[in-house]
Amino acid sequence: MKSTFYSLLFFALGSISYCQDRYVPNKDNETEFIIDGIISEKEWKNAIQVDLDYEVNPGNNIIPKEKTKVYIVYSDTHLYVGFYAIANPKEIRASIRSRDDLGMISDDFVIIAFDTYGDSRNNYLLLSNAFGSQLDARAVNALTDEDRYDINFNVDHETSGSIVSNGYQVEFKIPFSSLPFPNGNNQEWNFNFRRNTFRDGIPIELRSQVYDRTAPCQICQTTDRLILSDIKIEKRVELLPYLAGNVTGSKADILDELKYEKLKPNLGLGLNIDLNKNSTLEVTLNPDFSQVEADVTQIDVNSAVALEYPERRPYFNRGTDIVQYISGAFYSRSINNPLISTKLISQGKKERLFFLTALDQNSIYQIAGEDKSYLGKGEESFVNVLRYQKLLSKNSRLGLLSTNRYYKDGGYGNLFGTDGWFLLTKNLRLTYELFLNLNKEPNADWIDSNDIIFGRSVKLDNQNFNGKSLYFQLYRNTEKWRSYLTYRDFSPNFQADVGFVVKNNRRWATLYHTYQIFPNKPELQFLSFGTKADIIYTYEDYLKTISIDGIFSIKTLFNTEIEYTFDFDAFKNFLGRDYRNLESNRFKIQSSPSESFVINFNLTIGRELAFNEAIPEKGKELTFNLIPLIQLSNKLRISPSIRYARLKHLESNDFYYNGSISRFSVRYQFNNFFNIRIVSEYNTFSDRFFIQPLIQWNPNPSTVFYIGGNQNSLSEFNDDLYSIFRVDQTQLFLKFQYLIGI
């Protein structure tokens, strides 16, 4: 056994390298660059040139038909990059968009990718379309695009773009102070350049270096070297004050007039200090974490567990890529309403440190069960999160985590663990997570339930308990095959008080194996088919689930991706009852045939359990999501959507549930920083309608001004006088937040 372990460790510590070129741009402190989207010879005369010589999709590292030139030059304090993308101006897809608008991925755009530490821990991506609209993101090595890209990562930089007679040009001005990188005036970064465009409606990806799409580590392939000499390291000291206010109005009775409360002003302050180039301290006092735009409401009518929502609060998104876990050990939205919070982030060449503290005024208390979760709203608590990661080599890393939550009136939740990531060979990757929790419940009435979990009452009555979780995955990717073996283990009393864990008491194994080909033809750009098998046992060795999926996926004409999954649950146990032969057919279609139209469609047909019935029974399931996006002009777009779900009795025409959520959004983008939009939503499950108009100005990641409101109809009044467009509750709000550099 020991010899096997040391053999694996030996391979993990080895170095897997990709080819690289070395670029040494000229330093220019004399030229005054005007970032206007025009690459003039006068400004860029001292720049070196890099060409995008490789088409990596759909072609496999072939010479591209589309020519792209990139220019690089730098000064003491800034890096300047200019893209000249040759194209037919009439065929360029581009719209004026607000910052970090995901709709930009349907445009033509260019990308700068940085791995400033050269260790493949992540890539910093700076994107711009032909009009200079920005999207910045952090890429990590994950299996799915949903987990791979963190678009909440921000870099304060300037971009400007313009469409010219034979293509488009984009200029970047990137302050060195806005990028994380090692200490020192002489820098050597990994980087490359990319361009995404369309040829006869087919998406094309170009790169400045060779790309191996079969490798299990994608971000490891940013390996060209950028040499920068004698730059100035500027320490940032930033203040982020804000002023906000809101006024609410409501009705006591349906026939009453709206009665408004007094204006509720709010003040807060953020402080960001660079201790050195590797370490940053953030402090936030009375932060305003209200969201600018309402979350898309999820259909939870047939969910037995709490639903997870994405984090949109900038403070909790900065630096938190290091605390993302498959096991749900950390979930930033579990810190609900902090009065004060501090965060220390330090990342050197061989190690990273993340330390977060918060005084949460309204704690969330969540208990995971075997088949359902329990959620309660608590009182004050103090939260610690300490994360350390050691980079053993470019292809291996180990980490430690400790999270703690101490409740004001007694009780605590402590979690400790370790994780690792190892690139064993060019095509093989191993990851693991192991956590232990030590808990004492508060004595509180936050959860009203008489249920018992493995001998422990769900009711909060000062009980002590502990548990563990284990996650292990072996992942392999080649030109023709993609496979992984995953094992998850959650003990009956595993709980993460600063995390998101909704089910436990399970030992869960998954085997996934699929065949994939890249025909590189307009009508068939990609094809894959395979299977996924799951088997789950409880800690009492009771069989919980046997599930087998058949999966088919293609990319075809009109920039269309189609995926079909046949999900067959041969056996499922829920709340102690056994069910057999639950099958469903899931279709997923995403298409962007033109700049003006994008559509996402999901459909599920089959049989499912009515989980929230007193005695769950099988039913006929039909759910679908239809989400089109229509670009009416460079500045105006609309996005109607409908999400529908029903579960019908097998033996009658009655329904366990039957409803929909309709949403309509319209946005007018005056320029890259200023927009107005209106969002409305009608939920038939709750008979509730709301509309939210909003005006927003956002010139950089931190400075923002917005004014808007929420108008709601309340379902409680609908029995007396039904009208979804009636306003029973209203809120008007505004906020001004301004970044001050000292």
Image: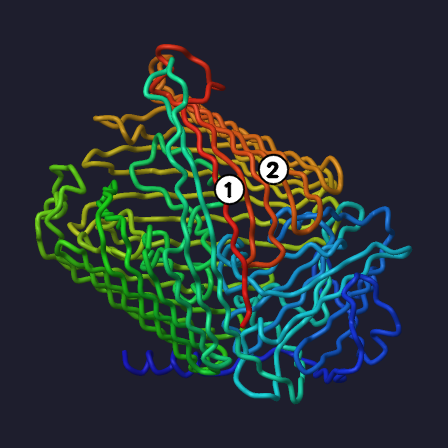
Q: Provide the residue designation for mark 2.
A: 677
| Mark closer to the chain start, 1 or 2 | 1
The answer to whether marks 1 and 2 mark residues whose Cβ atoms lie closer than 8 Å is yes
Number of the label disc, if any, that sits on residue 491: none
In the rendered view, would you say 676 is above or below 151?
A: above
Q: Is residue 582 left or right of residue 297?
A: left
Work out whether residue 25 or residue 292 is closer to the camera in this orientation and state it. 292
Q: Position of residue 487 (x, y in %)?
A: 33, 58
Residue 89 showing in the rendered view: yes
Snapshot quadrant of residue 596: top right
In the rendered view, would you say 207 is above or below 294?
A: below
Snapshot quadrant of residue 329: bottom left
- Say which residue appears at 60% left-offset and 59% top-offset: 700
Work out whether residue 298 or residue 22 is closer to the camera in this orientation and state it. 298
Residue 622 showing in the rendered view: no
Q: Amino acid at mark 1?
A: Glu
- Say which residue appears at 39% left-offset and 72% top-offset: 344
* Distance from Cα at disc 1 to Cα at disc 2: 10 Å
Q: Amino acid at mark 2?
A: Arg
Q: Provide the residue designation for mark 1.
A: 293
Q: How is the image coloured?
A: rainbow
Q: Secondary structure at mark 2?
A: strand
